[in-house]
Amino acid sequence: MTATTDWVHSPELQHFGSSRAGEAGDAVDGAVPRLVIEPTEPAHMAAALAWVTRERLATVVRGRGTKLGWGRPPSRVDVVLSTTRLRGGVVHRHGDLTATVQAGVTLADLNRQLATQGQWLPLDTAFDAATIGGLVATNDAGPLRHRYGTPRDLLIGITLALTDGTVVKAGGHVVKNVAGYDLAKLISGSFGTLAAIVDATFKLLPIPRSSQTVVAEYADSDLLAKDVATLACSQLEPVAFDVHVLAGELAGAPRCAIAARFATSPEATTIQTSAARALLHGDNQVLTDAAEAAWWAEQVRRPWALPGTVVRLGWMPAALPEVLALVGDLRRSTGGPVELTGRVALGAGLLRLAAEDAAAAVAIEQLRASHRLVTNITVLRQSRVMKRTVDPWGPAGSTATVLASLKRTFDPAGILNAGRGPI
């Protein structure tokens, strides 16, 4: 294998854009890369991928690094391929309600630019510095998922740099585009294990003219579950419908709450908000403007702002009462607060376990054993010590053979994402 100093000074690096030796601040879950390459053009990214493949270098594609702790710990990271310099101008086709944006642009910057034309990409994330490439690679989504879906649902086209050094495009620039294999959806949620995202094209929506949120608090989780079912079965159409449940004492936090956000015309928003309040039995209030924005920002960030293990999970919406009971069981078994934050009508959320590693590991095992109630148990945040015994992705499922075949097709050298998973 080539020596580290040879990589840093290799003549080939001039074809990849900017490059430098890795530093402590570039560490991927504790592993410091030997080299950081920062391509400035798609061709640079593709050439760099071809080179690391030939050299058999364990490589991680990184945006702003907001989710580098997700996944298995790497045994080594030779190269970090950064997308931060891939942030050229956004191609906004406001008449078609679409935009093409390079991978290194942050969601916040993108929506600021789209807002000048009264449009937005309706995604939310807990991480202010999250890039478009990172959002697609992890399929990260927040409360707006209730109405608008995840990045996978809003993608209509994508450009990728492959490990053989080619740049490929899939999809198109208009919403009505069904030709060919949907490569964009395959790459969404692949965590950088198959290819490097260069740019993505999304369908957009007009920014709603009005927004109001009803927040209802409960002392009884059974009553909360009944109100969730009532609201979900009604004719009301919230853009976000979330639950927050805390089992355990924590100052300043309600034990149980649901929130429904309505965003459309001023008249329709007011009508739906009033109708929602009439259906709810919990103590409720209406939030608007800055108070509303602050509540949702806290809802999105809360699992990450406090210490503990964070687990992503899914459930059948109708099984919410049993899921809430399970949260209580975990509280008793771990001895620490357990907090559920999620999209209540979709059955998807995050569970924060504020417990020691040993107790949290037992709780995760308990969750994975409850596969008839909760599914897709993925540990997004855990200590490096805990990762030695608890696989973030869990046991291989029935799709393992197919995923392994895809990995061999896109990354035959097996160098992408340095074994961090999920493929």
Image: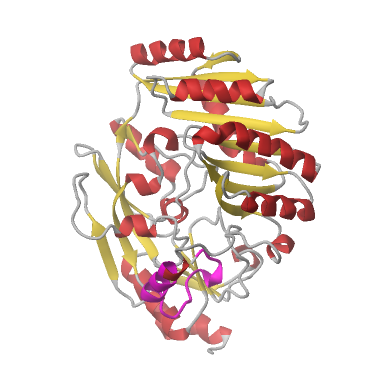
Residue drawn at 34 percent across, 68 percent down: 161
On the rendered image, what quadrant is the N terminus found in? bottom right
The answer to whether residue 54 is magenta is: no
> Can the viewer see residue 343 in this picture?
no
The answer to whether residue 420 is magenta is: yes
| Relative side of 405 to 368, left or right | left
Residue drawn at 40 percent across, 76 percent down: 408
Which of the colour schemes (rainbow, by chain, secondary structure, one colour) is used? secondary structure
Q: x, y (%) of residue 184? A: 32, 56
Residue drawn at 78 percent across, 55 percent down: 358
Q: x, y (%) of residue 244? A: 61, 31
Q: Is residue 264 above or below residue 162?
A: above
Q: Is residue 108 above or below residue 272?
A: below
Q: Is residue 82 above or below residue 345?
A: below
Nearer the observer, 316 or 378: 316
Residue range in magenta is: 402-422
Nearer the observer, 195 or 39: 195
Q: x, y (%) of residue 33? A: 58, 72
- Quarter of image, res 247: top right
Nearer the observer, 147 or 266: 147
Nearer the observer, 94 or 223: 223
